[in-house]
Amino acid sequence: MRSPIHKEGFFIAGIMFAAGFISSVVSKWIGRLFYLFGAFTIYFFRDPERQIPQGESLIVSPADGKIVGIDSVEHVPFIDGPAKRISIFLSIFDVHINRAPIKGKVEYRHYAPGEFLPAFEPKASIKNEMNTIGIEDSDGSRVVVRQIAGLIARRILCWKNPGDRIERGDRFGLIRFGSRTDIFLPLDARVEVSLGQRVQGGATVIARRV
């Protein structure tokens, strides 16, 4: 049975609780502060199950959060041309597990170091640390997902590599402590979300292939 908390959360929370126990010898208030941070860490790394929508044309959200951008870009690696982009901002209160938007095969992965601008800023998608994966379905349609570190985020995790098969809604990565996730779609995809809308990774249909 899958744990409702990602294992990375237990490690960090364990450090916080240990620090709280040690600090409480000197100051109960400092100890309580570490215990509070530990409890929040457990909350932050929650990993809930999701009901994945069924339908070959559906593209689901790769992340929980708020839609902060819907636009087009001239060129996207792996898609090798123009694409529609949907940007999702994840606050520290959102689930930070990333999920696959479509079923297919991971054919591309690229990591780029960078800055740590606030994730909601447009420049974050260019200047910040990021990890990008490209997925191709059985019909040859390609979708790109980009994990972008934010002001607080200092670690991007991705568990999939080129050659791996992936199902729609599968967990593929994690960004810890505030971040942004961009998804790039074919120009003929029909966007099903709007600016300001809140979405759930793996559960919210954000577009349809036509």
Image (cartoon, rainbow, N blue to C red):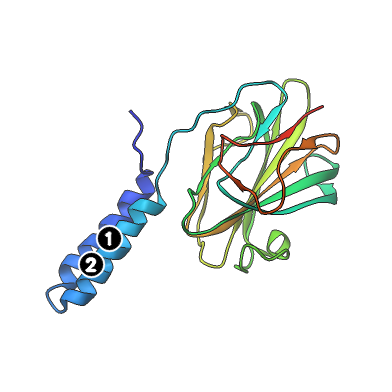
**Which quarter of the figure is the N terminus placed in?**
top left
Q: Nearer the viewer, residue 116 or 54?
A: 54
As drawn, the residue found furthest toward the left would be 25
Which percent across, then down, holds residue 201? 56, 40
Secondary structure of the residue carrying numbered label 2: helix
What whole-number distance in Å separates the C-alpha atoms at marks 2 and 1? 6 Å
Residue 78 sits in which quadrant? top right
Callout 2–callout 1 Cβ contact below 8 Å: yes
Q: Is residue 6 left or right of residue 22?
A: right
Which residue shows up at 28% across the image and 64% down it?
Answer: 36
Which residue shows up at 36% across the image and 32% down it?
Answer: 2
Which percent across, then down, holds residue 154? 50, 62
Secondary structure of the residue carrying numbered label 1: helix
Amino acid at dot 1? Ile
Q: Nearer the viewer, residue 13 or 156?
A: 13
Which residue shows up at 78% across the image and 25% down it?
Answer: 140
Which percent across, then down, holds residue 95? 48, 48
> Is residue 158 visible to us here?
no
Q: Nearer the viewer, residue 155 or 38?
A: 38
Q: Is residue 159 left or right of residue 115?
A: left
Which percent across, then down, holds residue 121? 68, 66
Would you name the residue on which mark 2 appears? Answer: 19
Amino acid at dot 2? Ala
On residue 6, the disc is none
Would you name the residue on which mark 1 appears? Answer: 15
Which residue shows up at 70% across the image and 59% down it?
Answer: 125
Residue 210 sits in which quadrant? top right
Crowding at mark 1 (Cα within 10 Å: few <14, some 14-19, many 20+): some
As drawn, the residue found furthest toward the bottom would be 26
Count of numbered marks: 2
